[in-house]
Image: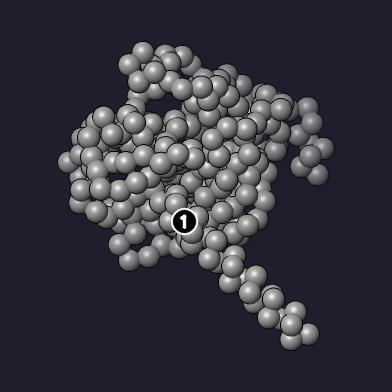
Amino acid sequence: MKIVGRFSRLGKIMAVAAAFGSLAAYQTSAGQSNVQGSEEQHRAAGIFDTGLTPEMPGDANCPGITSGFADRYNRSGTLRSEYSPWLFHAGTDWGLPVGTPILAIADGRVVARRDDGPGSATGKLVILEHDLGRDNISSSYVHLYGFNVDVNQKVRKGQVIGFVGNTGKGVTYPHLHLSIYGRRQAQIGNRKLRYRYDFLQLLSGDMTPIDTVKKRNQKVKVAYMDQFGKVHPPGAMVIWPFVCERSSTDPGAGKRRR
């Protein structure tokens, strides 16, 4: 019994250590004053205007994007470089009320979960690792109000993993900041970080490289989960991070709700 107890404690210690290691590798923001870097460094790190825009479904109401990937301005029209260590927005934001459930965008595993701390720019966050067949894709969900998953837990797309909040230093309104990461490292200013992808590129299913000059000027059909737990279109690998309310009657809704 003592041996079992020791191994159990060792397993917990190793799990905690792995979580901290993952968190360091996936860190989404930092307090260094010189992280800003150059426009060329941002492009090399994947942070550039991809030309992709969402094509929202006609049969459902999905929360819209508040601040897009690689935006230079925030929602009030202020240049990010005037108040932020980033020249461009390194993720995608949805402004929604505190407590709004956040969905896993794809099947995966929780590799990190962190509470808010003094001076933290990210606040509470959850990071998932996905097996999507290319570049060790991971997703981070930042500024959360609370969690609904634990480290090392496997999750399914559409599963509630946390709730919208406004945690983190300098956050002015409740929103989800979603970042998509690849495997390789890039340098911006005085720090290294993992290569970023536009969430809309992941949603499109086409992860081939996008030319930073020509871009990929196209609309991406939004796959989503409705209020009844049904994914549209069926078989979609990646979905919108929030429930979309169906505007038409779902014939199977009554059965699922009972």
Quadrant containing the N terminus is bottom right
Q: Quadrant of residue 104?
A: top right
Foreground pick, 52 / 232: 52
Quadrant containing the C terminus is top right
The reply to whether residue 190 is in sight is yes
Q: Is residue 215 above or below residue 30?
A: above
Task: Report the number of numbered marks.
Answer: 1
Q: Residue at x 54, y 38 (%)?
A: 137
Asked which secondary structure carries label 1, the reply is: helix
Q: Residue at x 38, y 45 (%)?
A: 193
The reply to whether residue 146 is in sight is no
Residue 36: percent from left, percent from top: 23, 42
Compared across the picture, whether 59 is left or right of 97 comes to: right
The amino acid type of the residue labelled 1 equals Leu
Q: Is residue 169 above or below residue 214?
A: below
Compared across the picture, whether 49 is left or right of 40 comes to: right
| Residue at which label 1 appears | 23
Q: Is residue 176 above or below residue 68?
A: below
Q: Quadrant of residue 79?
A: top left
Quick one: label 1, few (<14), some, or many (20+) residues within 10 Å?
Answer: some
Q: Residue at x 34, y 31 (%)?
A: 44
Foreground pick, 90 / 229: 90
Compared across the picture, whether 31 is left or right of 210 comes to: left
Residue 242: percent from left, percent from top: 55, 38
Compared across the picture, whether 33 is left or right of 219 comes to: left
Residue 39: percent from left, percent from top: 24, 31
Residue 112: percent from left, percent from top: 53, 56
